């Protein structure tokens, strides 16, 4: 039953073995008594790992060898550098086995080890060293001696193992390490090696074993690697070639194809990541036994692959070229200049320079606009180098002047135009042109002979206008007499509605002498020794409004809190935005246009609602206004909560310093104060942003601090959202 369990264990170990094929668990290790080396299995007895000092290596009176440690031979594996990773006290170690052979007791140390990945049918030569010795305390007695022999048995694994080889190594009396070579041919890929010693009758005999990591002779075939071809050329000193596909011969079993930088097996291996793209140079192919890494097919390889750099110039079809009017540039990448027979390779391009040594940035070869000499180079984009450092591929370019406007009449998408109220003029520049040449402008005149230029084509009144192409550089026209005309008609527009609007923001709202007001900290925030103001001169809502004097409290707008966006929406369907403007909010809550006056809007019929938005407050929607088609309309959100339209949402405004204000906290501007706003605000708060025009600055004082945190926490916990979310 024990035999069955053992060989089943052998089979399982072989399945999961991580040991490289034909590597061998060495017999050295940390010195100890009643122990075995790593990877071995104890079959019987009490082996030890010893050193020249004695069994266990600790030098105690009962453990030294019978010969002084300085005379005890050092194990060969130590001299071969295989024990460098051991501690000082464990160096020079080896396996010690004994046999107690007495009439009443026969006790033998037996160990074995499983080795996998053998190639069945292949001849192997296994080498080990043995040394016969005895401990000091037993010398001179009739009960002990060095063992008379050592036994090595090689067998197959499995439930019914087959013994392939059994060899006895006799003690010849020579007190030194003796090498023994055992030849065998495996019938399976997993083998079991068993080691024991034999003592003379009525004695306890000792023998020592020294086995290295690679105890097998090389068996890889010795033929040279055969290559499909051995020479290749590149246009670039930085060029690369792949060695992967050069092998013509077949890699032998358990062999690996490797490349080295020299012809001898001791030369440096080529890094694996370079094999698919080696630089210019010479490389030699070897087969290395993957089971015995020190074994090569040959010591000197003749399988040489050479990548040579061959300096290459760009081939030209012509050495001179000139532009063809109306074109004012030359394309050097045409077949009229470069030879079409010189095909570009993968990751290759031509580059042109105004010098012959590719100094400075390359020219735009497809649009050369300056006369002169231009030099061509081949350039490798992957490895960033040129095929030559000195180009002889020179092209002389001549750029002659010509009118880019050409001779064709302007083709317009329309022949008439009318103003769109409230505009009282027409922008001629908005007329689509379908045939405009490059490097030209479309210009407008009041006559067909381009003598009376239109002062401002963006504000054309009623009349007939003629279009021309004009060369941006030379100033010449496409024609002396234009037949392309546009007739403009102007329709009268309704008068504007003036809106007196008042609204407060919760964040900056405070009280002075019992009167509600808003701080204008962002307008007067000191940004330097003599500079101030964080408010942007252009509105932040993408409306295009500009107020250059926004940082000046003495401007026509006075004390400005921030920009707001005002929308005129349909009364019955507030989702319809009829008109919107980006406007200025003063500290007293009034809303002004950038001209310093109340904003003016187009008249609307059918009723409207006024919506006000701010970049970090919840937008508010007003009640319906039936009349919004003429004169002046007044609306003050700050006087009552009921001035905000509510369709079931929480209160749309909060009372602060005696006035109703737009609630704070909608950092994301999606009409609700939620976790997304929290994440955005928290990031800015943790960074301690200051001196910023930021949506996370909730009280508009130029920094993100605990005050803003308190404001946000209030709105977040209240679950505020705007009625505008429904539209």
Image (spheres, rainbow, N blue to C red):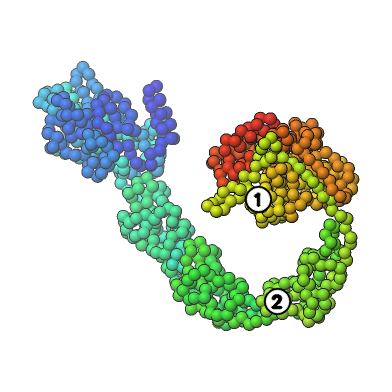
Identify residue for label 2: 471
Q: Which residue is drawn at the image coordinates 74% and 41% (left, top)?
A: 503
Circles 1, 2 touching at the beta carbon (< 8 Å)? no
Q: Tell me the element at label 2.
A: strand
Marked residue nearer the N-terminal end (1 or 2):
2
* Residue 430, horizontal then vertical, whole percent: 78, 64
Which of pointers 1 and 2 indicates the residue nearer the eye? 1
Identify residue for label 1: 553
Q: Nearer the viewer, residue 152 or 410?
A: 410
Residue 152 appears in the picture as rendered: no
Q: Nearer the viewer, residue 545 or 290?
A: 545
> Would you say 170 lies left or right of 219 here?
left
* Residue 533, horizontal then vertical, whole percent: 61, 50
Q: Which residue is drawn at the image coordinates 39% and 22% (left, top)?
A: 1
Q: Tell me the element at label 1.
A: loop
> Would you say 388 lies left or right of 325 here?
left
* Residue 583, horizontal then vertical, whole percent: 73, 49
């Amino acid at each position: 039953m024990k035999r069955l369990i053992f060989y089943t264990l052998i089979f399982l170990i072989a399945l999961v073995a991580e040991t490289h094929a034909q590597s061998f668990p060495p017999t050295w290790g940390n010195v100890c008594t009643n122990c075995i080396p790593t990877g071995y299995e104890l079959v019987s007895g009490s082996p030890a790992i010893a050193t020249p000092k004695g069994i266990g290596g600790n030098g105690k009176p009962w453990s030294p060898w019978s010969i002084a440690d300085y005379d005890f031979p050092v194990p060969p594996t130590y001299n071969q550098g295989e024990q460098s990773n051991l501690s000082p006290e464990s160096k020079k170690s080896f396996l010690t086995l004994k046999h107690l052979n007495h009439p009443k007791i026969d006790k033998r140390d037996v160990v074995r080890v499983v080795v996998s990945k053998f190639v069945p049918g292949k001849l192997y030569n296994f080498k080990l060293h043995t040394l016969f010795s005895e401990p000091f305390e037993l010398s001179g007695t009739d009960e002990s001696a060095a063992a008379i022999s050592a036994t090595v048995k090689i067998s197959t694994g499995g439930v019914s193992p087959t013994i392939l080889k059994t060899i006895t190594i006799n003690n010849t009396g020579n007190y030194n390490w003796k090498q023994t070579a055992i030849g065998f041919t495996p019938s399976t890929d997993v083998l079991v090696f068993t080691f024991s010693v034999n003592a003379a009758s009525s004695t306890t005999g000792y023998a020592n074993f020294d086995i290295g990591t690679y105890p097998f002779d090389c068996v890889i075939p010795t033929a040279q690697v055969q290559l499909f071809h051995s020479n290749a050329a590149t246009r670039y000193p930085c060029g690369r070639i792949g060695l992967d596909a050069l092998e013509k011969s077949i890699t032998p079993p358990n062999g690996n194809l490797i490349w080295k930088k020299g012809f001898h097996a001791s030369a440096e291996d080529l890094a694996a990541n370079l094999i698919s793209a080696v630089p210019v140079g010479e490389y030699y192919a070897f087969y290395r036994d993957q089971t015995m890494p020190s074994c090569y097919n040959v010591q000197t390889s003749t399988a040489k692959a050479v990548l040579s750099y061959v300096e290459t110039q760009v081939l030209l079809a012509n050495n001179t070229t000139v532009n063809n009017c109306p074109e004012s540039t030359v394309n050097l990448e045409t077949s009229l200049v470069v030879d079409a027979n010189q095909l570009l390779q993968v990751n290759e391009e031509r580059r042109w320079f105004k010098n012959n040594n590719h100094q400075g940035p390359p020219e735009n070869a497809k649009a050369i606009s300056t006369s002169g000499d231009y030099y061509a180079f081949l350039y490798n984009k992957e490895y960033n180098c040129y095929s030559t450092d000195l180009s002889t591929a020179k092209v002389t370019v001549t750029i002659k002047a010509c009118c880019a406007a050409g001779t064709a009449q302007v083709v317009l998408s329309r022949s008439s135009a009318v103003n769109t109220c409230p505009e009282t003029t027409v922008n001629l520049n908005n007329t689509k042109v379908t045939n405009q040449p490059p490097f030209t402008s479309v210009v407008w005149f009041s006559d067909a002979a381009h003598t009376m230029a239109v002062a401002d084509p963006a504000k054309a009144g009623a009349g007939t206008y003629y279009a021309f192409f004009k060369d941006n550089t030379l100033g010449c026209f496409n024609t002396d007499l234009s037949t392309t005309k546009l007739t403009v008609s102007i329709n009268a527009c309704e008068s504007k509605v003036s809106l007196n609007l008042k609204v407060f923001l919760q964040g900056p709202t405070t009280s002075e002498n019992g009167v509600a007001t808003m701080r204008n900290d962002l307008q007067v925030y000191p940004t330097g020794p003599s500079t101030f103001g964080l408010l942007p001169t252009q509105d932040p809502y993408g409306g295009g409004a500009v107020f250059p004097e926004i940082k000046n409290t003495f401007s026509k707008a006075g004390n400005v809190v921030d920009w707001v966006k005002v929308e005129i929406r349909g009364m019955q369907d507030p989702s319809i935005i009829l008109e919107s403007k980006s406007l200025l909010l003063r500290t007293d809550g009034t809303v002004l246009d950038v001209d310093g006056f109340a904003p003016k809007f187009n008249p609307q019929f059918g009723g409207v609602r006024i919506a006000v938005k701010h970049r970090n407050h919840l937008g508010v929607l007003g009640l319906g206004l039936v009349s919004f088609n003429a004169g002046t309309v007044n609306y003050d959100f700050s006087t009552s909560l009921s001035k905000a339209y509510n369709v079931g949402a929480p209160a749309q405004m909060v009372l602060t310093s005696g006035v109703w204000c737009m609630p704070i906290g909608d950092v994301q501007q999606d009409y609700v104060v939620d976790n997304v706003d929290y994440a955005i605000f928290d990031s800015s708060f943790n960074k301690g942003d200051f001196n910023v025009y930021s949506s996370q600055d909730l009280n508009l004082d130029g920094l993100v601090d605990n005050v803003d945190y308190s404001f946000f926490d209030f709105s977040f916990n209240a679950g505020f959202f705007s009625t505008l979310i429904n539209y």
